[in-house]
Image: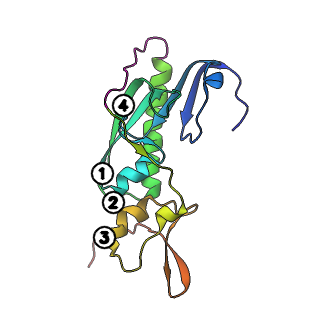
């Protein structure tokens, strides 16, 4: 992480570190953008986990950073709807656009916001690792489709072991010809 100095607003996007109070106190506000409707879905890789679970409506939350992961007061929420065919680049491209909207909201409402405390019991997603992209060669394409489409084809592609070798499995969307 680069050296953090001080300022009015620190925005944490796709942040996998816990930013301690001694750093947060250098800023008037420290905000996190998180791809889940907290308190449910706190933790790591929430977009990936929710798509794997079969969800199509994903909340993205702008909230204050707090000592306990993803537990701060909520500034705003946006909902992304997916149709079920979007691949990694499309999923995360949409997330990036939503994050930009929420960053604009944070800057525009910085001085007037009245955040809302989270309510209810939270749930947490664990950090994803390479093993979470493993599929079994006996599974159907339908069974593994959501896992494969959220697996980063460069950093952690879906993979399987078969006949003594490991294979990466990635998806590319093709245009369907109207001429049949």
Residue 126 position, x and y percent, is 47, 49
> In this figure, what is the number of numbered marks?
4
96 is higher (above) or lower (below) than 174: above
Front disc: 3 or 2: 3
Magenta segment boundaries in residue numbering: 110-120
Residue 48 position, x and y percent, is 42, 52
Mark 1 lies on residue = 55
Mark 4 lies on residue = 77
Residue in front for this viewpoint, 10 or 19: 19
- CA gap between label 1 and label 3 equals 15 Å
Residue 76 position, x and y percent, is 38, 26
Q: Residues within 10 Å of mark 1 (few under 14, many from 20)?
A: some
- CA gap between label 3 and label 2 equals 12 Å
Question: Main SS type for the magenta part?
Answer: loop
Front disc: 2 or 4: 4
Of label 3 and label 4, which has the lower sequence position? 4
């Amino acid at each position: 992480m680069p050296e953090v100095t001080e300022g009015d607003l620190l925005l944490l996007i796709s942040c996998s570190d816990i930013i301690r109070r001694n750093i947060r106190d250098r800023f008037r506000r420290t905000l996190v953008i998180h791809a889940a409707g907290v308190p449910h879905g706190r933790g790591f890789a929430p977009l990936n986990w929710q798509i794997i679970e079969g969800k199509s409506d994903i909340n993205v939350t702008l909230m204050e950073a707090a000592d306990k992961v993803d537990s701060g007061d909520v500034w705003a929420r946006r909902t992304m709807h997916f149709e079920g065919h979007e691949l990694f680049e499309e999923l995360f491209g949409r997330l990036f656009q939503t994050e930009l909207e929420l960053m604009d909201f944070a800057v525009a409402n910085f001085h007037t916001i009245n955040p809302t405390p989270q309510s209810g019991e939270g749930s947490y997603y664990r950090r994803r690792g390479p093993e979470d992209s493993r599929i079994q060669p006996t599974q159907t394409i339908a069974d593994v489709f959501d896992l494969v489409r959220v697996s980063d084809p460069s950093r952690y592609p879906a993979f399987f072991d078969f006949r003594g070798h490991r294979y990466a499995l990635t998806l590319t969307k093709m245009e369907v010809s109207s001429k049949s």
